Amino acid sequence: MTGAVRVRYAPSPTGFPHIGNIRTALFNWLFARRNDGQFVVRVEDTDQQRLVPGAVDAILDGLEWLGIDWDEGPRVGGPYGPYLQSERLELYRQAAEKLIAQGAAYRCYCDRERLAQVRKQQEAEKRSIGYDRHCRNLSDGERRELEAAGLPSVVRFAMPTSGITEVDDIIRGHVEWQNDLVDDFILLKSDGFPTYHLAVVVDDHLMEISHVLRAEEWLSSTPRHLQLYRALDYPPVQFGHLPMILGPDRAKLSKRHGATSILEYKDAGYLPEALENFMALLGWSLDDHSDVMSLEVVKENFTLERVGKPAAIFDIGRLDWMNGVYIRQMDAETLAAAMLPFLERDLPAELLPVDFDYLARIAPLVRERLKTLAEAADMTGYFFAEELDYGGANLVQRGMDGAGAVDALTKAGETLGRAESFVSADLEQTLRALGGELGLRPREFFGTLREALTARSATPSLFDVMEVLGRERVLARIGAAVDFLKTQ
RNA sequence: GGCGCAUUCGUCUAGCGGCCCAGGACACCGCCCUCUCAAGGCGGAGAUCGGGGGUUCGAAUCCCCCAUGCGCUACCA
């Protein structure tokens, strides 16, 4: 890598950042960190009409949640600020003026109506090449007249009408376009705001960005940017167009694909580590066998050479698996702490606050069963409940009858009441013995006990559950189950 | 319609001329473990490498054509 690496993530606050946007941020960050470079965040808020309130914070909060830190940008400042394009309008205006002065850009007075007309016409003739350059060849006199009439105008770039523009994209390789097929795009809108094309080139230059790593949807705009670099006499950056991330329907990721905002993944119970690991593997790979790896490992090994070209389809099932892997790696305390906010959110209010020490003993029992933290309340609710609802419980296991179940539970209660140890392994031993005496199969006996203690058919190991519940709760629940059976 | 990019199991991918009649992972199926559910272990099915031409002793890997998908084609980014 020659020269200092400075990359940027330049989100537009016209919506909430989805996996694709964040993956772009992640790759830029990875590239910066791997190459001892700087990572800049710049907000591209040049579309005043489509601004979404709160989007900037959602983007920044999302990055912070993931631990993607930026060296310069909103919230942290930096020597190349401001980092909000809406506060840099003068810079773009100057660039546009300079281009006009040297004949590389011109004012265009065409209104939307005429533009629509031109488009319609071209469509009918099946030759669409964008703006027809109507205002490009206006005489000075005509310009003065239009200006005097006070007509609103935009500034358009005068694309070369011959030759080609070529780029050696770090990821795509050599790509070229015929200049006469690129139309005279708008630089400055009539409201004085720049378009993306002008702003991105001016800022990337002024902020001394070395590499532009962005999604592939921008590849088609690259000849425009390259021509702008040339006209402005800026040394061009290195471009790298990242593969897109598509929804399961193979279309560009959007709201209809479920969770859109990165923060929604947080609420859905995904761990930042898992999400990052998952995203890193969307378009990048380390080798032929590594999938679960820490961000640290990804960072150490991240190179653009190993970024793929084909678009990737976002498969939430794989994210679920990855999340489960990371949950299983957590120790009891950490998992409990991670589960806590979800329990506070999802558990019935009367069961709060949650006793953290109790939670920390529950955590290991559900650790290998959780795919997301959002399942925590559902999976652990019975530990906290005062009373269980046996309405849907299967207290009488197949092969037993009601009387047998009452008998089994009663005997179990008596035995447990005087058990010396309430530790899982000991409980298992005594209950297995009791089950044998009662002539019940483990499946029947433990199944009935499980339902009595949890009102569920699937739980962690019965004896572990009993140990954590403790003798008092266990006896109370067995008693309640017996009462329930007797009133049936 | 024009321009551009892409194309290996359903999905994420490995592969950069012979190690590949294609490897790993998720999901799926079966078996084992087992008090249920998971987790874990073992095994299975699943890709004629989009199709067709070349180049080469030899191609998933290089070239050409076609098809398909996606992106751009806005005073949106």
Image: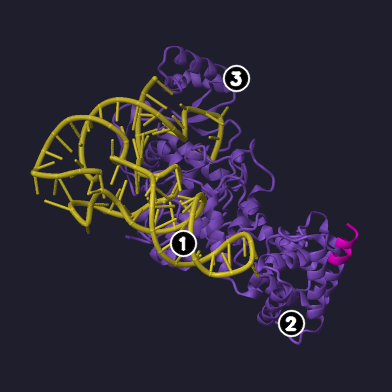
Residue type (three-letter) at the residue carrying disc 3: Ala
Residue at 64% across, 58% down: A269
Residue type (three-letter) at the residue carrying disc 1: Gln
Q: Are marks 1 and 3 in contact (CB under 8 Å)?
A: no
The percent position of residue A170, horizontal first and vertical second, equals 34, 49
| Mark 3, residue position | A149
Closer to the observer: label 1 or label 3? 1
Outermost right residue:
A487
Query: Is residue A341 found left or right of A306 in the rendered image?
Result: right
Q: Are marks 1 and 2 in contact (CB under 8 Å)?
A: no
Q: Are marks 2 and 3 on the same chain?
A: yes
> Which residues, given as a range, are shown in magenta?
A481-488
Residue at 64% across, 57% down: A266
Q: At numbered mark 3, what does the secondary structure look like: helix, strand or loop?
A: loop
| Mark 1, residue position | A38
Tell me, what hue is chain B?
A: yellow
**Nearest the eye: A133 or A465:** A465
Q: Is residue A208 above or below residue A473?
A: above
Query: Which label belongs to residue A422?
Result: 2
Q: Earlier in the sequence, mark 1 or mark 3?
A: 1
Please rate how many residues cluster around mark 2, counting C-alpha atoms within 10 Å: few if below 14, some from 14 to 19, many from 20: many
Q: Quadrant of the N terminus of chain A?
A: bottom left
Q: Are marks 2 and 3 in contact (CB under 8 Å)?
A: no
Q: Are marks 1 and 3 on the same chain?
A: yes
Q: Is residue A44 above or below residue A37?
A: above
